[in-house]
Amino acid sequence: MGQFGKILKFELRGYLTNKVFVGVTIFLVVVLALVLFFPRAMDIIGGGDGDEPGTVEPGDRDVMLVSGGDEDVLAALAEAFPEYEVKPAGGDAQAAVTSGEAQCAIVMDGLGKFTYFVDNLSMYDTNAERAGEALTGVYRLSALRDAGLTEAEAAAIMSSQVSFEVRSLGVDQGENFFYTYIMIFALYMVILLYGQMVATNVATEKSSRAMELLVTSARPTSMMFGKVVASCIAGFAQIVCIFGSAIIFYNMNRAWWGDNPIIGLIFDMPPALLAYMLIFFVLGFFIYAFMFGAIGSTASKLEDINTSVMPVTLLFIAGFMVVVFGMTSGSVDNPLMIACSYIPFTSPMAMFTRIAMSHPAFYEIAISIVILVASCLGIGIVAAKIYRVGVLLYGGKPKLRDIIKAAKQA
């Protein structure tokens, strides 16, 4: 345990003091800050004061003038534009807009037609469309009254709607699709990035001949598990830093994002789903990190790393594609996905996808986790044996059967 702790601290210190590691983390946090503060910044640039939406006093609102409209028109526009102070024009509405007395004006050319005046038309200005929707109801109500119906009868017809209700007896796949995609994509990036880093670190130590001394003074299992656990902690710390800052930035700007459904779904993940995400994320990372570390020890030169780890990379990409196709097809409980839920190389993605977008039985989840834990330990021990043998192999690229034979004898 003492050897494992020393190796873990040494490797972890190497990750946390790496300028590229720290630089990438800071860069991503800054990018997230720019994205999540964007609505607030646009509000300030557009003339707002940056105060939380909904806290503007009536006297501070922009003015919308209405010319030629009756009380029904004014009431409809006031309801449709709560951010404006809607009032009748006392004079020339166009001149008031030009002089800056009003932000915009609506001049009614009859009940079924109006003209929208604004000084500088923004590409994001949708006031005319919103006014059209609001005044359509007034126009229809007036037409029904003119047809001989009473105001109450006309209002009842206008307010009548077809009602419906949707009840999901299982899991709402559309709601959990974003959680699933984020987890799988994050696992994809972390495994390929940190797995490659583990393999590169091992190959670098081997090429410097420092590994020959280390392997004779420390147990290979301590070295392998120390390296992999250190890379996992570093990767997890980076993810927590990035996603944690994203949650903080989002909560600081929640009011400016309003009811954005996509943003809301991403940051309102159910706690149970988050717990499963962490479990499968960590176990999936261990599986592949051990494999990358073992293969890195067999590379004779640092330049051979990319070709050496290619089989493991292709294996992971194949599993990733199977899960993505299962997600997009809408049938995550097909036979292939169920089988992948118990194969340790694909179960971190496949089983989590089924948990998020379906309703697998608890015993299925438990079996998948048990298989993953046992596979992590087994692959870790085998990787340690390959590691012990691989660091002493130089010259040409060793063949797979030679590595397996030497590992059995280790």
Image (tube, rainbow, N blue to C red):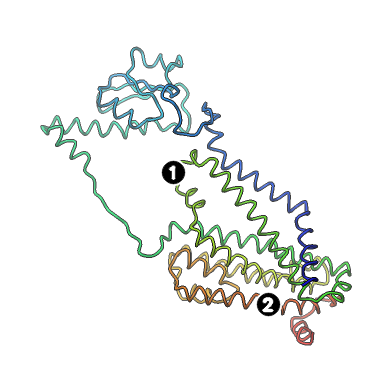
Image coordinates for residue 77, horizontal then vertical, percent? 32, 28
Q: Which amino acid does label 2 sit on?
A: Ile
Q: Tell me the quarter of the picture where residue 283 sits.
A: bottom right
Most foreground residue, 365 or 385? 365
Per the image, label 2 sits on a secondary structure element best described as: helix
Name the residue carrying label 1.
Answer: 259
Looking at the image, is mark 2 or mark 1 earlier in the sequence?
1
Q: Which residue lies furthest to the front in this view?
A: 2
Q: Residue furthest top?
A: 91
Q: Tell me the quarter of the picture where residue 128 sits.
A: top left
- For the point 45% across and 28% down, which residue is it? 56
Q: Which residue lies furthest to the left in this view?
A: 148
Image coordinates for residue 181, horizontal then vertical, percent? 53, 59
Image coordinates for residue 237, horizontal then vertical, percent? 67, 56
In the image, taking residue 244 as reference, residue 155 lies left or right, namely left
Most foreground residue, 356 or 270? 270
As measured in the structure, the alpha-carbon distance from the residue carrying label 2 to the one carrying label 1 is 46 Å
Name the residue carrying label 2.
Answer: 379
Most foreground residue, 341 or 244? 244
Q: Which amino acid does label 1 sit on?
A: Asp
